[in-house]
Image (cartoon, rainbow, N blue to C red):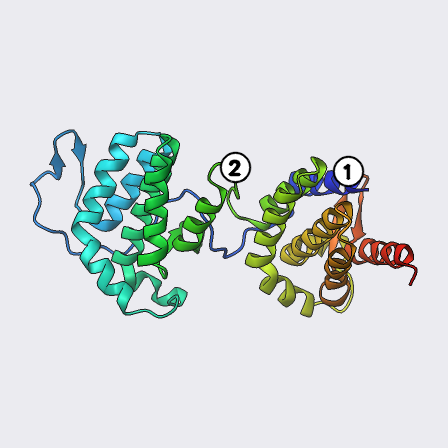
Amino acid sequence: MWQRMMMGLMAWLVAGGVAMAEAETGTVAPSPSPAAPAPAAPGAGVAGEFDFGNFTSETLTTKSWEALNRQDHKAVEAFTKKCIDLYEAKAKDQSKELTELPPKDKAFDYWALNDVATCHFIRGQSLLEQGQVKEAQAEFQMVIEQYPYAQAWDPKGWFWKVAQAASDKLSTIGTPYDFGDYTSQTLTVKAWEALGKNDHRGVELYTKKCIELYEGDAKKQQAQLKDFAPKDRAFDSWALNDVATCYFILGESLMAQKQHKDAQAAFERIVNDFSFAQCWDPQGWFWKVTVGARGRINKILAMSGE
């Protein structure tokens, strides 16, 4: 049955049905910040072969992302080092002011913190791509320990937690796993693909990441419904649909591993908390995730003799 459901998710993607969310992701995107006072610098902003522009943390971070995207690791090192050298002291001062993530409307106030942490993250990714694993791990660990409340801005419209992205990098180094752009869409499809390969570790990673990031939105969307949404509005409940589907995939994986009690708990979460979730079947209809979950619960109960 999972093959049919996987096809349904892929068809959903083709239909463009799952919207982006305000996710804390690790996407490779510029992290703009309000212009910081520029330090004394050469008139044209050029030092050797690298152009540091106006020397603001915003400019240096953006140039670092651009260099990483074109795999110019020498330029990555130059731009990230310049940003860190100039703004690390300010970043540490701003970090000390916080005991939790600042709200979205205050996040840009911590421009040095955000950009310095992001530059360490970019440097870590660059080192990783060059095969310098220990050095990359040190950069990611530095972000986690020294800048736990740093956020990076994706121009698509959301912040992502730099320390969380660094933690994800540490947990997946040396593995084939990658959270991609962290959208519920991407994570759900990767979970289906892992299930299709009987890759239960991959299923666990992708489903739990989707649930971690989007369960709050899923519950809000569920609360707004009194029945299953009509076909032309079903995709509006993207978080509800994807989170419930990830619980279903997780349950399927646990059943395959004969962890029936844990599988039943995953299916019961769908029935109890996400009862109006739907997935698209390529033959032209939505299937109700809760119906599939109830069927699996009945199967587990029958096997246990209850």
Quadrant of the rendering where the C terminus is positioned: bottom right
Quadrant of the rendering where the N terminus is positioned: top right
* Residue carrying label 2: 175
* Residue carrying label 1: 3
Residue at 35% over, 39% down = 134
* Cα–Cα span, label 2 and label 1: 25 Å
Q: Between 3 and 109, which is closer to the camera in this rendering? A: 3
Label 1 crowd bin: few (<14), some (14–19), many (20+), radius 10 Å? few
- Circle 2: residue type: Thr
Residue at 70% over, 55% down = 247
* Quarter of the rendering containing residue 211: bottom right
- Circle 1: residue type: Gln
Residue at 60% over, 53% down = 208
Is 264 positioned to the left or the right of 108 in the image?
right
Secondary structure beneath dot 1 equals helix
The picture places residue 88, in percent across and down from the top left corner, at 21, 54
In this view, 172 is above or below 251:
above
Q: Earlier in the sequence, mark 2 or mark 1?
A: 1
Say the numbered circle drawn on residue 265: none
* Quarter of the rendering containing residue 297: bottom right
In this view, 154 is above or below 197:
below
Q: Is residue 32 visible?
A: no
Q: Mark 2, mark 1: which one is toward the viewer? A: 2
The picture places residue 60, in percent across and down from the top left corner, at 24, 44
Q: Between 129 and 183, which is closer to the camera in this rendering? A: 129
Secondary structure beneath dot 2 equals loop
